[in-house]
Image (tube, grey):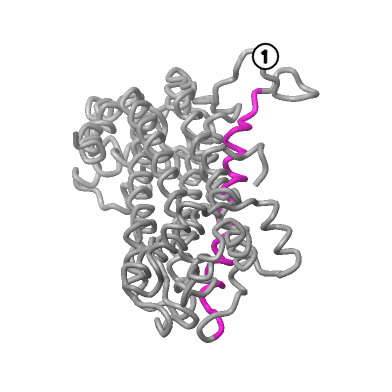
Amino acid sequence: MIPRYSRPEMVKIWEPENKFRIWFEIEAHACDAQAELGVIPKEAAQAVWQRGKWEIDRIDEIERETKHDVIAFLTNLAEHVGDEARFVHQGMTSSDVLDTCLAVQLCQAADILLADIDALLAALERRAKEHKYTPCMGRSHGIHAEPTTFGLKLAGHYAEFARNRGRLLGAREEVATCAISGAVGTFANIDPRVEAHVAQRLGLRPEPVSTQVIPRDRHAAYFATLAVIASSVERLAVEIRHLQRTELREAEEYFSPGQKGSSAMPHKRNPVLTENLSGLARIVRGAVVPALENVALWHERDISHSSVERMIGPDATVTLDFALARATGVVEKLVVYPEAMQRNLDSLGGLHNSQRVLLALTQAGMSREDAYEAVQRCAMDAWEKGKDFQALLKSDKAVARHLDAAAIDAMFDLGYHTKHVDTIFKRVFPG
């Protein structure tokens, strides 16, 4: 995490103050449950809530000696609670605190990311409907294929982020589990009802089987989901980057007054925001392999996963939060040039109608092989020599035997390619 690519709300989730607050709530709720079961005095549980405090600097000081962060926290907590602190952490192990806390933090992060996706969806929907019938060239392999609309392009991205929202909801639900089960997860020294109470208070579910840790397949799925979302951000970014190329100039990032594109060339208007999004997506995807490797731990637990999660937890969520917000801003302010889109559509003289002519010839009686050869012959002549494709078709004897000039002219209607736009939009935006 660096400030340049961080937003305060997400950063706060990973700051020590929030972490220790969650640790405290885990311990305090556990004390409440223990008191209710008669394991510890109710006065002790009350004392934890009433006098429970901690200081980050003091915890760090104690940890420098103990080399154990949870013990350092409990020691500092005891300095405030007093004698009743001996009842804190009864029957628990450090992973009960650490894993349950991580679950809370990942849920908090997911809630912010879900709000980010909602904002991006709203921007995509507005711009898609704005350009629902704005014609542009569809490309495959970067080469002119057949016409589409700019609204359809954006609708496709909307549908993708809608799927991502569902994925993130599922990942949030899967990672939202609590473990308060003791040294190897057997509840030997703590009642399972304590776990259930803490889980309920923190908005989690008890982990069915928690060796000494919550199984890391849950976390792997979470970070994999973040990576998929990041890849969707990059797909949107790459599309805009391509459309902004000088040779196309169909759309571009908003270039604000006073903005500079190059230290050397004053004319430059570079797609710096979307290029940045491609780079940030790589960072988020970089968390996936370490998260997958965390799944295989020794026996009931080792801590090879711990250092990994202390890094990828903040880095992946903070980076994706920033990327989603930036993508939303890009879409909201995206400058679209319908005239350039139409100019590019017209630049090859109607070659994009080749499939329609091919199909018409087969319907008129030509074999598909002969029809393909005839249409391609005219298309390549137009492509290589800049001739008019429509005129070449009319003068081709093989074509003319099956289609008259009026029939060929009728096949160069742009509306033919966009007649089902409304049908597709109703699938994406049913409301």
Magenta stretch holds residue 131: no
Judging by the rendered image, the residue that carries numbered circle 1 is: 258
Q: In terms of secondary structure, where does tag 1 sit?
A: loop
Q: What residue sits 48% from the left and 36% below the top?
A: 381
In the displayed structure, does residue 157 sit left or right of residue 57? Answer: left
Name, please, the residue furthest toward the top: 257
Whether residue 153 is visible, yes or no, is no
User: Which residues are drawn in magenta?
Assistant: 269-298
Residue 272 falls inside the magenta stretch = yes
Residue 114 lies, with reference to residue 250, above or below; the image says below
The one of 300 and 66 positioned closer to us in this rendering: 66
Could you say where residue 425 lies in the image, as x and y percent from the top left? 25, 35
- Say which quarter of the image contains residue 255: top right
Q: Is residue 270 above or below residue 192?
A: above
- Most frequent secondary structure within the magenta stretch: helix
Q: Residue furthest right?
A: 264
> 340 or 143, which is in the foreground?
340
Inspect the image, locate mark 1, and give the three-letter code of the amino acid beneath it: Gly
Q: Quadrant of the C terminus?
A: top left
| 140 up-or-down from 27: above or below | above
Q: Nearer the viewer, residue 282 or 344?
A: 282
Q: Residues within 10 Å of mark 1 (few under 14, many from 20)?
A: few
Q: Is residue 44 visible?
A: yes
Question: Residue 131: x, y in percent?
Answer: 35, 24
Q: What residue is rendered at 70% in x and 64% in y?
A: 63
Residue 160 percent location from the top left of the image:
37, 46
Residue 364: percent from left, percent from top: 19, 43
